[in-house]
Amino acid sequence: MPLNHKFSLVLDGSGEFFYCCGYNDTGQLGIGTRSSKMEFTRVNLPGKFSSISAGWEGFCVAVAEDGSLWSWGSNSDGQLGINKDPLAMPYVLSPVQIQTAEKFTQASAGWQFALALDTFGNVWSFGDNYKGQLGLGHTRSQYIPVIIPRLSNITQISTGCQFAIVLDSCGNLWSFGANDFGELGLGSTEAERDPRLVSVDARFVQISSGWNHNLVLDTFGRVWSFGRNCLGQLGLGSNSHQTSPKQIQSLENVSKVICGGNSSYVIDIYQRVFVFGGNEFDQFDLQDDESRWDPIEKESWHGHSIIPAGFHTLVVDQEGHLSVFGFIFGGCQGKQDVEVEQRTQVRLQMKRARP
């Protein structure tokens, strides 16, 4: 998940371990201590994991291959979902299983809250709920996962800072939580405590959220964007916020959309990569710090895997070489041999812009 800007996690292709670096003040690196790491460090997992999502202000949620749900790091608002009062357990230093009877397929971490999708298409939420981002019709925080009653047949979930969007099996888009910049796509800036259907003449197949903006991909390979646009992260040629989904006319035949904090990345069916939005720390590796209001083709990243974050981008090339562009608070620079992407030996190449 692209929200975090202070640390990075990269899950190995085997699912048995991950590499991490950056700040670790609340145990978000999962290494069993609160010591920060200036280089990528291997962390063995208690089983095989299928995905990890890093949330804002130092916590992570993860899904194991057996469907179990895990978390670690800060528990300031109950976002670990382990039914522990934050005053009694403010953080957890290593991955711990969230005790639920359900099996899960996805998890997404936002700003001190998280969503999880079970095998029956139900969405569960936990953590901070100040803006109604748990979708439960109220603003009380939750220390354990609670099912969102108004959602069913959901296929994808995505969290922003204090909001979330979800996609159902019919291609409909739903949203709830904070809405200061129109990030809910409802044509207004009013927060919503319950899930609301986004009215748009399209059916969607993939969704992605940044801090306060979204990219959504429809069945025809077209990209729509909405929410905050201060740095051009909507790709619409301006910096005006957008309260309803609007199609990016210059993009077509798209296969994947990915949001960073204030940055956006699009991959088409030919494996071409396009970038736009915030580039204040040269996270696009363009040799400058100028943001881009329109999509531009990033030719050197064609065919690569893109993993964006707050102010940096992780790129894994076809040979398994991992490069990091931009800035990670707390360090993580230099070179180191690590193993990611199907256990392929790779070399970490860190390009760090000014803080």
Image (cartoon, rainbow, N blue to C red):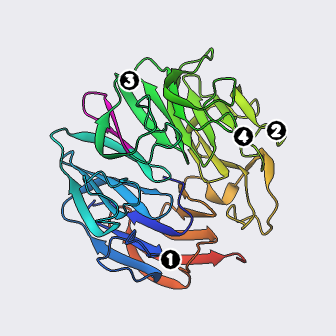
Amino acid at dot 4: Leu
- Secondary structure at badge 1 equals strand
Which class describes the residues within 10 Å of circle 4: few (<14), some (14-19), or many (20+)? many
Asked if labels 2 and 3 touch by Cβ distance under 8 angstroms, the answer is no
- Where residue 152 sits, quadrant-wise, is top left
- Residue hosting label 4: 234
The residue at the far right in this view is 238
Q: Residue at x 75, y 43 (%)?
A: 229
Residue type, mark 1 in image: Leu
Instruction: Estimate the x, y position of residue 314 in percent, counting from the top left.
Output: 54, 64
Q: Earlier in the sequence, mark 3 or mark 4?
A: 3
Residue receiving disc 1: 348
Magenta stretch bounds: 115-126
Which residue occupies the foreground of this view, 213 or 49? 213
Q: Look at mark 2 in the image and give the residue it sits on.
A: 240
Of tags 2 and 4, the one toward the viewer is 2
Callout 2 secondary element:
loop
Q: Amino acid at mark 2?
A: Ser
Q: Is residue 180 at all visible to an observer of this figure? A: yes
Prevailing secondary structure class for the magenta stretch in the rendered image: strand
Q: Position of residue 80 (x, y in %)?
A: 33, 55
Q: Are marks 1 and 3 in contact (CB under 8 Å)?
A: no
Residue pointed to by mark 3 = 151
**Quarter of the rendering occupied by the C terminus:** bottom right
Check the image and name the residue furthest to the left. 101
Residue 316 position in % (x across, y down): 50, 62
